[in-house]
Image: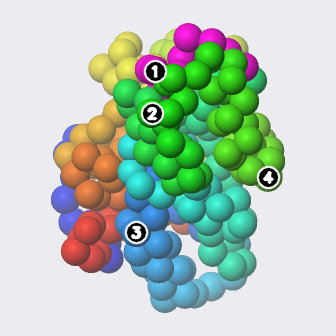
Amino acid sequence: MILQRWRGERAKAPARNGAAGHRAYAIGDVHGRLDLLDGLLQQIDGDHRARGGEAQPLLIFLGDLIDRGPHSSQVVERVRGGALPGFRTVALLGNHEEVLLRLLDGEEGLLRQWFSFGGAECLASYGADAMSLLTMPEQTALEHIRHAIPAEHQAFLHGMGDSFRFGSYLFVHAGIRPGVPLEQQSSIDLRWIRQPFLGDRRDHGMIVVHGHTISKAIDERANRIGIDTGAFHFGVLTALGFEGEERWFMQQMEDGPA
């Protein structure tokens, strides 16, 4: 269902276009909420069929598929396997995936921090007990994590990108460093930035579509659109659709479509 409410500056935004011949749907931070993702994918599939035409469909996941919610492994498997038949899938790396990859690569000093922001729930979805790992030497615990997460999931996470350009839109997880050319942006900013990006009003030369920073309503400004509406915190997962000069919103809540 198309969302009828948002906050921000939609009226001030210049006309923008998606990539010719394509229809794209960007999905905000899922955070292990397979129930919301499955409901939203059903909405997207129905919306695409209803719109018809010859446009090639595309799904863009803005990162943070994992942690916090109860079904990280199942969400990764859903996205990795092709979330919707006939749709091309692009999955971007969020800061939560970055931390997990650093752990998988053997970095020490992150384990307790990861557990504190949802890593324990992520491991539970893979059948591992996070609390038992805290009693082990750190490298032993990291080896248990590598063993718990299937190799195909690790390969999928390693293959996630940092940004995706679609016509006049740029998709990233967190945002960009204002005033820095895209090719010079750091991965740290693309995955972690909040300020000064969120408060910057300059024209970036494209509309940046991002997640990472939670808002209760879609945060639409002249130069950016934030669609992390708190799947874990508020039980609301948002998608933003694009075709030509048109864009529209859909949401899945715990009790059904918005």
Proximity of marks 3 and 1: CB atoms separated by less than 8 Å? no
Q: Amino acid at mark 3?
A: Asp
Disc nearest the viewer among 3 and 2: 2
Which numbered disc flags the more N-terminal residue, 3 or 1? 3
Q: CA distance from mark 4 to mark 2?
A: 25 Å
**Precedes in sequence: disc 3 or disc 2:** 3
Residue bearing mark 2: 131
Q: Is residue 229 left or right of residue 72?
A: left
Q: Can you identify the residue that label 4 sits on?
A: 152
In magenta, the rendered stretch is 106-114
Disc 4 from disc 3: Cα separation: 23 Å
Q: Residue 35: which numbered mark, if any? A: 3
Task: Measure how far apart labels 1 and 2 are at the Cα level.
Answer: 10 Å
> Rounded to the nearest whole Å, what is the CA distance between mark 3 and mark 2?
26 Å
Look at mark 1 in the image and give the residue it sits on. 112
Q: Callout 2 environment at 10 Å: few (<14), some (14 to 19), or many (20+)?
A: few
